[in-house]
Structure formats: structure tokens, C-alpha cells
Amino acid sequence: MKSCMEIMLDRRSTKKYKDTLPSHEDIDKIIEAGLSAASGRNMQASVIVAVTNKDIRDRLSRANAAVMGAGGDPFYNAPCVLVVLAEKTAHTYVYDGSLTLGNMMLAAHELGLGSCWIHRAKEVMYQPEWVEWIKSLGLEGEYEGIGNLVVGYPDGDMPAKKERREGRVVYVD
């Protein structure tokens, strides 16, 4: 079993997926890791919407592509999308949601799954259709989309590790 440090250093974004949906058990483990992320004042502002329904997944993908101003599938054919929303009443909601996404990416990697953080959740989730969708899920309050985590089985090899840019650490002793 890999150590936490090895998982953090080995993880890469996956940009090509097989059609096979991960098991609900694995999706639940990824979600559990996300819900265990640190949050400001322990407010736990993040909410995760697990989308495994292909029709809704495809609608989300089209809405994301429209915001991006492009065609194609910005979700890279991944069969699962974990939409991270956060309650705007928490002062640290963007950071909390970001930590949620980070934890889930690491958990997916540990489970042998690929993942990729896809932006534009904020813009998509402010559209009237998706505001109503959030309400239809029983979520009350004002939420902002923080990010979409696409998850699935990689189709092909994982990308090679890229060199890290130098000069990003300054010690003050």
C-alpha cells in the first residue's frame, strides 16, 4: 500500500476515461474523503452531488462546454461527476470546497481511479436551470459551484510526472 505522501506525489489529472462506472462503494469512499476535508471553523460548508445518471451528466457537460465556449466533452468521457457546491454563508466556502476536491482527487488515485478537477461549476450552477436543479435535490440556501470532479477508470496510461517549477519556496528562518 502506498503512503499518503506517495499518493500525493503520484497523482495526475486524467483526461481520457473508459465508459465503465466505478462502483458505488468506491464513489462513497471518495465522497467520504471529501466530506472529511478541513473546513474553516469546522462549518463543513461543502456539499457533494454525485452524478452517475448519464443524461444529467451529459447535460452538465454540455452546459460546461457552453460556458467554456467550446464543443466536445469537457468531462473527458468520465462516467461520474462529483459536483462540489458550498454554502455561501461560510466565510471560507471557496477554500473549503477546494479542500474537498483535493481530498477526493487523492482518494480516487488511491483507489486506482482517475480524476480531474473541471472548472466552470460556478457559472453553470448560477444558470436558472441548475439553480432549480439544486433546489430539486432538497438543498436549501445559497450555494456556489466550486468545481466538478470527474471520476472514472483511465483509458490508457497515466500521464508522466511533469517537472515542478523552481523558485516557489522561500524560507524565513
Image: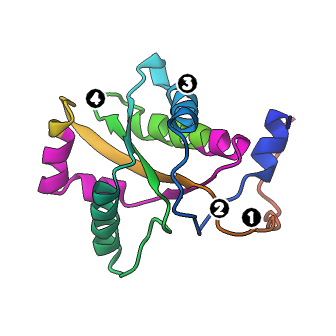
Q: Nearer the viewer, mark 1 or mark 3?
A: 1
Q: How many angstroms separate mark 2 from mark 3 (CA)? A: 25 Å
Return the mark for residue 36: 3
Q: Residue at x 21, y 35 (%)?
A: 137
Specify few, some or many for label 4: CA neighbours under 10 Å numbering under 14, 14-19, or 20 or more. few
What is the span of residues highlighted in magenta in the rendered image?
105-134
Secondary structure under tag 3 reads loop
Tell me, yes or no, whether the highlighted magenta stretch contains residue 33: no
Specify few, some or many for label 1: CA neighbours under 10 Å numbering under 14, 14-19, or 20 or more. some
x and y percent of residue 23 in the render?
54, 41
Residue that sits furthest to the top in the current view: 42
Q: Earlier in the sequence, mark 1 or mark 3?
A: 3
Secondary structure under tag 4 reads loop
x and y percent of residue 42 in the render?
47, 17
Which residue is denoted by mark 4 in the rendering?
89
Q: Tell me which amino acid carries mark 4.
A: Thr
Q: Tell me which amino acid carries mark 1.
A: Met
Q: Residue at x 50, y 36 (%)?
A: 24
Q: How many angstroms separate mark 4 from mark 2 (CA)? A: 37 Å
Q: How many angstroms separate mark 3 from mark 4 (CA)? A: 19 Å
Q: Earlier in the sequence, mark 3 or mark 4?
A: 3
Which residue is denoted by mark 1 in the rendering?
158
